[in-house]
């Protein structure tokens, strides 16, 4: 069976552009005028994801593609989320190494006295050095 090609209307693109414009203004208003506190980042990310999907589906013509090509976009998004998620989980679960008491000098030895400078305003300071 031959796939029917429906005629694309310019109004469809104008409608998507209008939605993208409204979402852009909404992002600006939420970022500058309305304070959402801890919800500002998730809301901004949600709006950006919606805008990305609209651009990919309509302006990159993924809506018109057959099934296998249409699956590429969500699969790539899933792999990107996995990659970013694993990197974030790794960074968030790192623990700073603890220093046992009494070995501060061994970990960070002091410089020799000849390279140390006196603090500003001390009587041993000579000509601003």
Image: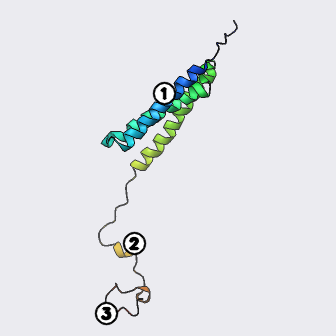
Q: Nearer the viewer, residue 79 or 3?
A: 3
Instruction: Give the SS element for disc 3.
Output: loop
Q: What residue sits 37% from the left and 39% below the top?
A: 30
Label of residue 123 in the image = 3
Q: Residues within 10 Å of mark 1 (few under 14, many from 20)?
A: some
Sequence-first disc among 1 and 3: 1
Above or below, 10 against 121 in this view is above
Name the side, left or right, on which 38 lies relative to 58: left
Cα–Cα gap, marks 1 and 3: 70 Å
Above or below, 87 against 101 in this view is above
Q: Are marks 3 and 2 in contact (CB under 8 Å)?
A: no
- Percent position of residue 83, x then y: 51, 40
Q: Are marks 2 and 1 in contact (CB under 8 Å)?
A: no
Q: Which residue is mark 2?
A: 107
Q: What residue sits 41% from the left and 93% below the top?
A: 127
Q: Quadrant of residue 65?
A: top right
């Amino acid at each position: 069976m031959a796939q029917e090609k429906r005629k694309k209307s310019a109004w469809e693109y104008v409608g998507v552009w209008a939605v993208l414009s409204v979402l852009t203004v909404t992002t600006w208003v939420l970022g500058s005028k309305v304070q959402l506190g801890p919800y500002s980042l998730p809301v901004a990310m949600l709006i950006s994801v919606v805008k990305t999907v609209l651009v990919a589906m309509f302006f990159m013509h993924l809506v018109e593609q057959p099934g296998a090509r249409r699956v590429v976009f969500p699969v790539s998004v899933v792999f990107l989320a996995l990659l970013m998620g694993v990197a974030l989980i790794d960074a968030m679960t790192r623990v700073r190494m603890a220093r046992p008491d009494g070995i501060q000098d061994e970990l960070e030895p002091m410089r020799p006295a000849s390279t140390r400078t006196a603090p500003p305003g001390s009587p041993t300071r000579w000509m601003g050095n």
